[in-house]
Image (tube, rainbow, N blue to C red):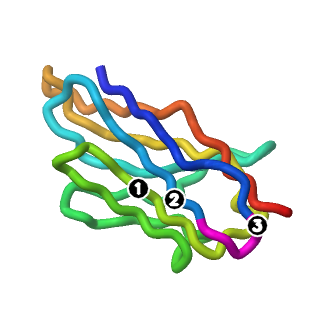
């Protein structure tokens, strides 16, 4: 069982910055990918950014050049630095991890979500 705990959401003005963090704990063999998805009211969940163990990152088109994902494999931790925030970035942000379990299965787990609100 893997558990993800997110932190760092909140209210920020347009153009501002926030940093989200996600920490994985539990029993697993290896975490393959860690990253972030978001879901705005009335919209489907979408990719924000994900990084594999070799530090290759994939970003959603709407956040390229503004957001940066990073991770520390040894600490099972991932972060999302969000700069130049826009009102349309307002959403619940979910941490996601793809991992190999103790039984050699590939599984995915989601965090509980953290709300990011961009506005005045």
Residue most extreme to the bottom: 65
Circle 2 residue: 19
Q: Which of the two residues, 104 or 37, is positioned nearer the viewer here?
A: 37
Q: Is residue 16 magenta?
A: yes
Percent across and percent down for residue 22 are 41, 44
Distance from disc 3 to disc 2, alpha carbons, whole Å, reads 14 Å
Residue 118 versus residue 99 in the image, above or below: below
* Residue at image mark 3: 13
Can I make out residue 75 in this image?
Answer: yes
Write the residue at 53% across / 75% down.
64
The residue that appears at 14% across and 32% down in the rendered structure is 29
Number of other residues with Cα within 10 Å of mark 3, as a class: few under 14, some 14 to 19, many 20 or more: some
In the image, residue 83 lies at what x, y percent? 58, 72
Mark 1, residue position:
79
Q: Earlier in the sequence, mark 3 or mark 1?
A: 3
Give the image location of residue 77, x and y in percent: 31, 47
Q: Which residues are magenta?
A: 13-17
Vertical side of 88 occupied by 96: above or below: above
| Mark 2 vs 1: CB contact within 8 A | yes
- The CA span between labels 2 and 1 is 7 Å
- Image side of residue 16 versus residue 74, left or right: right
For label 1, the SS is strand
């Amino acid at each position: 069982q893997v558990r993800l705990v997110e932190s760092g959401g909140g209210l920020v003005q347009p153009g501002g910055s926030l940093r989200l963090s996600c920490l994985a704990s539990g029993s697993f063999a290896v975490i393959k990918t860690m990253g972030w998805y978001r879901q705005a009211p009335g919209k489907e969940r979408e990719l924000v950014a994900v990084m594999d163990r070799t530090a290759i990152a994939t970003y959603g088109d709407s956040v390229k050049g503004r957001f940066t994902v990073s991770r520390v494999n040894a600490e099972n931790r991932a972060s999302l630095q969000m700069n130049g925030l826009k009102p349309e970035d307002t959403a619940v942000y979910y941490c996601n991890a793809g991992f190999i379990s103790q039984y050699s299965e590939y599984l995915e787990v989601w965090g509980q979500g953290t709300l990011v609100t961009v506005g005045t």
